[in-house]
Amino acid sequence: MRKSRAIVLGLLAAALARSAGAQGPKPPDLDTATVVDLTHAFDDRTIYWPNSPSAFELKRLAYGPTPGGWFYSSNMFCTPEHGGTHLDAPIHFAKDGLTADRLPVRRLIAPAAVVDIRAKTSADPDYRLSLDDVRAWEKQHGAIAAGTIVLLETGWSTRWPDKRAYMGDDTPGDASHLHFPSYGKEAAEYLVRDRKVGALGVDTASIDYGASKDFIVHQIANGAGVPGFENVTSLDALPPTGAWVVALPMKIAGGSGGPLRIVALLP
Ligand SMILES: [Zn+2]
């Protein structure tokens, strides 16, 4: 009796899990999916925040034939967490938020909603995604399901790695004259609190626009446990819906973020 009840409960739980997972589009078949790399390579031109104490460093430790006759190559690298294509873990702007190593990887694999605002940003480098923009997108493509990874396409990645064009200013140590587009406060509140999205990604240096002084979108997203993906690229290869994102950061224990390899799977 107890056993059959356990089986019924198990079937019920499985059905509930399936219906929860059925909110977004089905994942593409890995056998046939097209994989798009949404990651900038890390090198000596990788863009960091103006006050970053250092940039990406790669030092060769070995390269060439060994006395034993085989080839051997090895490097060491050093990088601040927040530069290039990277993760903002919730703790970046929330004292008790999850660190990079504690973010459940399952949450970093999810359907994508790609919001293209290039028509607005081309005329205004300080443009912020508005609530009306999100509502218009949802009218056309459907409501954004919980857990979705939102990717905001501003067109700014075509400026990479020209620091001045990408950031709006390239004065070392000075972050007070930056200009690039990103999310707006009301859109972020709607996506995070009402739509309960899994992450906010953007093809600029920050989920807040360059001129931001209070980093309110970071506060809203990270404060709700929602991570950010910054300096992503190649969003023009993605459809508005239907792609899945796999965004796996380096597993830095206690990290506030870190280098991110992010790819999209297209059916
Ligand atoms: Zn960051």
Image (cartoon, rainbow, N blue to C red):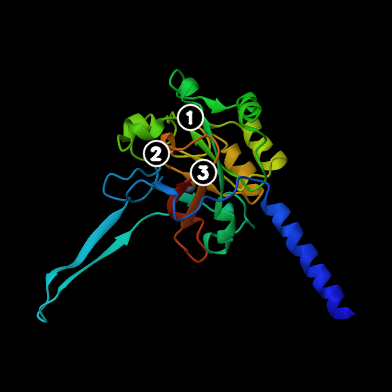
Residue picked out by circle 2: 234
Residue picked out by circle 1: 181
Left or right, 241 with respect to 34, comes to right
Mark 1 in CB contact with mark 2 (< 8 angstroms): no
- Across and down, in percent, residue 14 comes to 73, 63
Residue 204 visible? The answer is: no
The mark nearer the N terminus, 1 or 3, is 1
Left or right, 157 with respect to 124, comes to left
- Across and down, in percent, residue 30 comes to 47, 55
Q: Which mark is residue 223?
A: none
The mark nearer the N terminus, 1 or 2, is 1
The mark nearer the N terminus, 3 or 2, is 2
* Image vertical order of residue 199 relative to residue 258, above or below: above
The disc labelled 3 sits on which kind of residue?
Answer: Ala
Residue picked out by circle 3: 243
The structure residue drawn at horizontal position 30% and vertical position 61%, both measured from the top left corner, is 77
The structure residue drawn at horizontal position 55% and vertical position 60%, both measured from the top left corner, is 105
